[in-house]
Image (cartoon, helix red, strand yellow):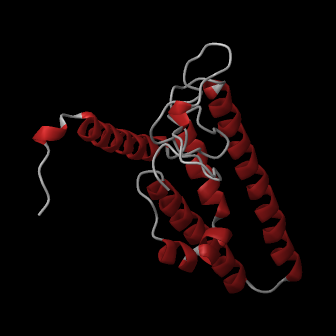
Amino acid sequence: MPVGITAGRTDNRRVSDEKDDKTGTPATPAGPRPEPIRFFGTTWVNHDGGYAARRAAVAAGSLAAAAVSCLVLRFAYEGLEIAAIGGLATVLVVVMFAVCSALAFRHTWDGFSKRPEPDRQASLRGLLAIGFVGSLLAYFLRTLTEAPGEKLYREEHEAAREQYERRAARRAGNPSKRKRKG
């Protein structure tokens, strides 16, 4: 889809060509739009719209979810003890959850700084489901400093803006100075 065109539009007008009824200014800026982040939308761009409150709420929510998850795992552990399946099986289950949580933490943490490969993401789906506590803790810790993935999204958005501005400058430049094809 061309930059500046809204999904689902049937005409080819740029979004910047549309004017606000009251002020006469463009309704939305031309160029690439920031990608929304879960729970934050696009408030991460200018840190407005309750960004700080959202960060606090998401941090508290992910920490609370991790605590509840640990409580559920504790009940599962007690169930294993009541079932008396044996010490080795109990130890293996505990080690499995610990290792999966550590791997899920690392995978989630790395996902905040670079886009995960879709094939790898699909192959790790089961491991990430088992290690959900690690993912929740990674989310909590990242939310203490920024919206999870904000740095990655900001870099991508700024690169897209720069590319858009370079293209716009080339289009607006002197046509006689353009290189001829052929």
Comparing 56 with 43, the one in front is: 43
Which quarter of the picture shows residue 26?
top right
Indicate the position of residue 97 as horizontal and vertical percent values: 64, 70
**Which corner quadrant of the image does residue 64 belong to?**
top right
Q: State which quadrant residue 114 falls in.
A: bottom left
Residue at image point 69% right, 45% down = 62
Q: Is 94 placed above or below 44 here? A: below
Give the farthest residue toward the top. Answer: 23
Numbered circles on residues, count: 0
Quick one: quadrant of the C terminus?
bottom left
Q: Which residue is depicted at the point 35% across and 42% down?
A: 164
| Coordinates of residue 138 in the picture (x, y in percent) | 56, 51
User: In the displayed structure, would residue 148 be above or below residue 116?
Assistant: above
Q: Residue 74, how many percent across, how many down? A: 78, 62
Tell me what residue is drawn at x 54 percent, y 26 percent: 47
Using residue 50 as the reference point, say whether residue 160 is left or right of it. left
Comparing 174 with 144, the one in front is 174
Which of these two is toward me, 47 or 94? Answer: 47
Q: Which residue lies furthest to the front in this view?
A: 176
**Image-based side of 9 in relation to 113, left or right:** right
Asked if 31 appears above or below 81 in the picture, the reply is above
Instruction: From the top left corner, tell me how far across and down residue 113 is, in percent.
Output: 41, 51
The residue positioned 63% from the left and 50% from the top of the image is 9
